[in-house]
Amino acid sequence: TSTSVKLPTGAAANLYEAVGTVNMLGHQQPLVLPFSLQDLSDDGKLVRATGQFTLKRLDFSLGKAVDASGDMVSNDVVVSFDITAQRK
């Protein structure tokens, strides 16, 4: 759930951060999601958002029963996204 979207101080004009909470399997963790937003059309109605962030899988008990230490499977899960959308 996003609670705010902001342009970080000193960041390029198209770089933003969405601040909120990730809810998964009954666990909640705060998240700052950095992303870029690019206009793909002259009228600004078609946009592309891209970004990447890392979650700690054990924070959500993912795979905890099999690998609680993170020795077999990395605790870091990199999530990348590339979304094209049309503005209303």
Image (tube, rainbow, N blue to C red):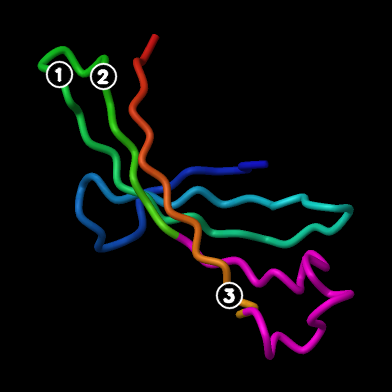
Instruction: Please name the residue shown 57% across and 67% down the image.
Output: 77
Majority secondary structure of the magenta segment? loop
Type of amino acid at the residue the image marks with label 3: Asp
Alpha carbon separation for disc pair 3 and 2: 33 Å
Which quadrant of the figure contains the N terminus? top right
Whether residue 3 is situated above or below residue 57 in the rendered picture: above
Q: Secondary structure at mark 1?
A: loop
Residue 73: which disc?
A: none
List the residue tagged with mark 1.
41
Which quadrant of the figure contains the C terminus? top left
List the residue tagged with mark 3.
76
Residue 67 sits in quarter: bottom right
Instruction: Please name the residue shown 63% across and 50% down the image.
Output: 20
Type of amino acid at the residue the image marks with label 1: Ser
Q: State the residue lying farthest toward the top.
A: 88
Q: Earlier in the sequence, mark 3 or mark 2?
A: 2
Task: Please provide the residue range marked out in magenta.
Answer: 53-73
Alpha carbon separation for disc pair 1 and 2: 5 Å
Task: From the top left corner, tell me how far across and down residue 79 is, in percent.
Answer: 50, 57
Instruction: Please name the residue shown 20% across and 54% down the image.
Output: 12
**Nearer to the camera, 55 or 12:** 55
Query: Which mark's residue is nearer the viewer, 3 or 2?
Result: 3
Magenta segment: does it hold 12? no
Q: Secondary structure at mark 3?
A: strand
Residue 46: which disc?
A: 2
Task: From the top left corner, tell me how far across and down residue 78 is, in percent.
Answer: 50, 65
Type of amino acid at the residue the image marks with label 2: Leu
Whether residue 15 is situated above or below residue 59 in the rendered picture: above
| Residues tagged 1 and 2 counted as in contact (Cβ below 8 A) | yes
Left or right of residue 15, residue 32 in this image: right
| Label 3 crowd bin: few (<14), some (14–19), many (20+), radius 10 Å | few
